[in-house]
Image (spheres, rainbow, N blue to C red):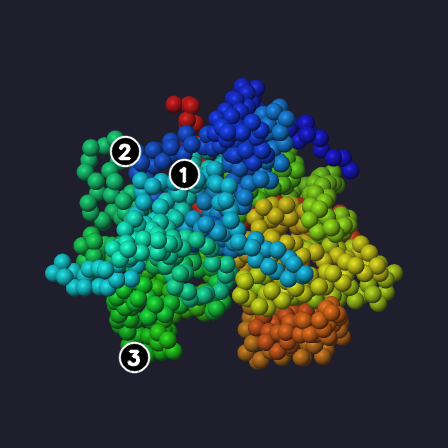
Amino acid sequence: MSVQTDSDKRKQISVRGIVGVENVAEVKKAFNRHVHYTLVKDRNVATPRDYYFALAHTVRDHLVSRWIRTQQYYYEKDPKRVYYLSLEYYMGRSLQNTMINLGIQGTVDEALYQLGLDIEELEELEEDAGLGNGGLGRLAACFLDSMATLGLAAYGYGIRYEYGIFAQKIENGEQQEEPDDWLRYGNPWEKARPEFMLPVNFYGRVVDTPQGKKWIDTQIVFAMPYDNPIPGYNNNVVNTLRLWSAKSPIDFNLRFFNSGDYIQAVLDRNVAENISRVLYPNDNFFEGKELRLRQEYFMCAATLQDILRRYKSSKFGSREAVRTTFESLPDKVAIQLNDTHPALAIPELLRILIDIEKLSYEEAWKLVVKCCAYTNHTVLPEALERWPCTMLENVLPRHMELIYHINFLHLQEVQKRWPGDMDRLRRMSLIEEEGEKRVNMANLCVVGSHAVNGVAAIHSEILKATVFHDFFEMWPEKFQNKTNGITPRRWLLLCNPGLSDIICDKIGEDWTVHLDKLQDLKRWAKDPAFQRSVMKVKQENKLKLASLIERDTGVKINPASMFDVQVKRIHEYKRQLLNILHVIVLYNRIKRDPSAPITPRTVMIGGKAAPGYYIAKQIIALACAVGNTVNNDPDVGDKLKLIFLENYRVTLAERIMPAADLSEQISTAGTEASGTGNMKFMLNGALTIGTMDGANVEMAEEAGEHNLFIFGMRVNDVEALQKRGYNAYEYYERNPELRQCVEQIRSGFFSPGDPGRFSSVADVLLHHDRFLHLADFDAYIEAQDKVSRVYRNPSKWAEMVIENIASSGKFSSDRTIAEYAREIWGVEPSWEKLPAPHDV
């Protein structure tokens, strides 16, 4: 197999920017200037990290003029602005993405090569911005990229967590969490904006005054904004992600100063600043902690003040008075709530309009509903936010009053429509009365928004049929679907340059912003030469991943084996256990007859478990233990390996997706809202083994079910089984292979030093399994056997790979954002390019 040389790599620049001699000289000059003047004033020798920062600042220089120009352009044109509110942004690294979007990667690469530096080594020094848990946070990051690429006047708003998602270490086969101190060396991409610092109020009490309600005696925390540039692809647009950091006011705890306890007063400033200290590491699970409530309100309150300040400010260069009325607010402002985490934006906007701007309740409420829209991300009951009324009354007394009032008027409407239907009133109330009184934040979002969407067609239908059925009957026009997508810039152009180049050779470069153009590849699906090109790139990517795994784990894997990959958060509903059961089946088959022919596989499982989620951590431990047994058995050799990939994150995903042969998307039908990893695998030429859940359904529609390995119960089968009562023992008794696997787990076969170690896992499978693993076991094993047969036919496999790549155009986040823009936000996407800063 031929290996690319450095000069080959530098020639293959195509869509990654054209190299000009002058441009290279300019980059070298800027880089040297940053090294000499900004980094090594007091040292003679620069470190690799100095070089990384010099490179980042050099690239940032190219961003800043475009950033200023874009914001100035929005100020002059005064378009309707889109505000995306999210508690999570899983951004990963910014350096390479910025170079690609600005079209300067080839130039910078050449400049550093001439300076004797390896750009890839420097890129490795950048910390991932891990300000998210998984799908929801990564979706927000893809959406930012697409909003900038489609020329929308859009702003992301969130929290600048000092500590992002924990770093996962596997020690003695168990997950340990380490804090992610991602800012310890500084962040070259952000710009602090202290001039826009804003106060946020907590606690206190509400009094009636002749002028209306007043919220007094509050504790104030300041929100300091940090702006992060979001470059569009090749269009000179640079949007802003504004992240808030909590700052204690100077006069915080004045009473301590007055009593002389100065030291204690300074130390207590931490209490206020803890708000932006750390990301809560739960995915699809609600933990009702007061600090989390304060984080949510902190982000909403700071953001809404900022939105209204921008709405009121006059046009650039104009002498007109600032806007003083609010009737045009919905024509200028669209607010998208990414799940219920920013739900407090609804009562907060209402509070500002009524208490501060002195609008009537009716006027204010109409404006709130017209401005706000809500995206639901899950139907799992344990994930839905339900805040205790007592906590809200204490932390946000005025908001609790407003929520009661919203609910009172809402229930009057329900009563009018369905007189005397008390059960419906209970179901549709924003306040849950059973046990401790709680506010159902999803219901608040539905009532307070003009549009509600799910994130895949099947998910949106489930919402209308179950969780929000009553609301759908009341307001069918509110409910929409917006199937998730991924940015093809990061998830193909950046992470898989080899595949990008052969696609460009065949169909040109338009696909980078019009991903549906990939369908033009279908005509070559059966072409042996194109099949060879695609599979050669796949093999090169597999070799790279194999050497990375060997370096990090010491396990040597067979690069000719099928790379069978499941990477995502560890959760029972995602059914990593089903995958592990399959590995045990394959292991037992090899042990029974070591000479029988077998399709070699390397099974990789990766993902983090929430620190308090016991069973998820047990699943990781079991994967490590099974891997330990399988990988060290001489009968098995390189026919089968199970690797647990430590510390799965965006940067590791960028290595894994291009190298995967098989993508595991095996959640119980009706539980995975959409999934986006499934799309990344498809775009990079992995085939999917999956249930008819989330976006898998639409992937099968696009590519044809015969090009995926679909198995298992559909949503209606799951409902029918649950109705008649699921008994795991039925399946356990019926299937000897399954029985052997469960017994090996239960008896300590994989944990000889601690035989009872995994008894709780066997117990879940047999007695407490909400996600019906054993009911889908037979169908899963059958589908996996089919995968093995097809993999042994390289031409058929390659044809299916090309059909999948060519069918993945729908799953671009550009398509998703264009739909949000036209159908929810009322703005039109634009593929026009802004003039470059030096053009004018």
Amino acid residing under circle 2: Phe
User: Residue 319 appears at what percent x and percent y?
Assistant: 20, 33
- Indicate the amino acid at tag 1: Lys
Furthest-front residue in this view: 260
Q: Kindly check if marks 2 and 3 are in contact, taking CB atoms under 8 A apart as contact.
A: no
Task: Describe residue 587's horizontal placement relative to residue 245 as left or right.
Answer: right
Residue 276 vertical placement versus 402 (above, below):
above
Identify the mark nearer the N-term, 3 or 1: 1
Residue 26 visible, this orientation: yes
Q: In x, y percent, where is residue 123?
A: 58, 37
Q: Residue furthest left?
A: 210
When the figure is inspected, residue 188 is found, relative to residue 106, above or below; the finding is below
Please identify the quarter of the rendering in which residue 209 is found.
Answer: bottom left
| Residue highlighted by disc 3 | 420
Provide the secondary structure element on which disc 2 rests. Answer: loop
Question: What residue is at 48 percent from the left and 26 percent from the top?
Answer: 37
Badge 1 or badge 2: first in the primary sequence: 1
| Residue linked to disc 2 | 316
Mark 1–mark 2 Cα distance, whole angstroms, equals 22 Å
- Percent coordinates x, y for residue 225 in the rendering: 37, 44
Residue 444 found in image quarter: bottom left
Name the residue that disc number 1 marks.
Answer: 191
Q: Residue furthest right?
A: 595
- Please name the residue shown 28% across and 74% down the image: 415
Which mark is in front, 1 or 2? 1
Q: CA distance from mark 2 to mark 3?
A: 55 Å
Instruction: Give the answer, above or below, for where 231 lies relative to 680.
Output: above
Estimate how packed mark 3 is, as few (under 14), some (14 to 19) or many (20 or more) residues with alpha carbons within 10 Å: few
